[in-house]
Image: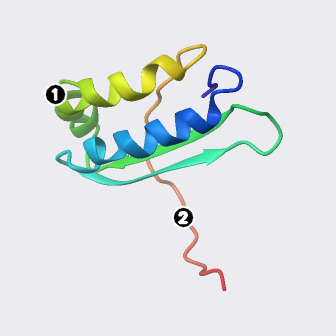
Amino acid sequence: MNIRAGQSAEFEKAFAQASPFVEASHGYIRHELRKCVETADRYLMLIQWETLEDHVVGFRQSPAFQEWKRLTHHFYEPFPTVEHFTAVYESQAQQA
């Protein structure tokens, strides 16, 4: 997702503030935010849910989502594409 130019620091603070709202949601497993090395103000956000419904119904239709939205959505430009994926392969290697 792309953030309005020059607002990365503010977005990262808002993301940290918003994170407890998603973390407390039913079916939440984990999430992460990664910043693009090559392109300023670009991020990848991954959120793992137990089921698709936990995200699109449980979280998206909750008051917690309204707070998440209030804190983060005004940074997006353009609004990011949201897609859902299922694991096919995951490395079990540990990094030292």
Q: Tell me if label 2 and label 1 are in contact, CB under 8 Å.
A: no
Identify which amino acid the numbered label 2 is placed on: Glu
Q: Front-most of 27 and 75? A: 75
Indicate whether 20 appears above or below 11.
below
> Quick one: SS at disc 1?
helix
Q: Residue at x 60, y 28 (%)?
A: 1
Separation (CA) of disc 2 from disc 1: 33 Å
Query: Total number of numbered labels?
Result: 2
Of the 4 image quadrants, the one containing the C terminus is: bottom right
Q: Position of residue 38 (x, y in %)?
A: 83, 40
Image quarter of residue 40 = top right
User: Does 62 sit left or right of 75 as displayed?
Assistant: left
The residue carrying mark 1 is 63
Q: Residue at x 54, y 41 (%)?
A: 12
Q: Front-most of 37 and 75? A: 75
The residue carrying mark 2 is 90
Between disc 2 and disc 1, the foreground one is 1
Indicate whether 30 appears above or below 91.
above
> Quick one: SS at disc 2?
loop
Q: Position of residue 68 (x, y in %)?
A: 32, 31
User: Does 30 sit left or right of 92 as displayed?
Assistant: left
Image quarter of residue 17 = top left
Looking at marks 2 and 1 on the same chain, the residue that comes earlier in the sequence is marked by 1
> In the rendering, which numbered label is found on residue 27?
none
User: Does 54 sit left or right of 94 as displayed?
Assistant: left
Could one spot residue 85 in this view of the protein? Answer: no
User: Outermost residue toward the top?
Assistant: 78
Identify which amino acid the numbered label 1 is placed on: Pro
Q: Position of residue 55 (x, y in %)?
A: 28, 35
Q: Position of residue 8 (x, y in %)?
A: 63, 34
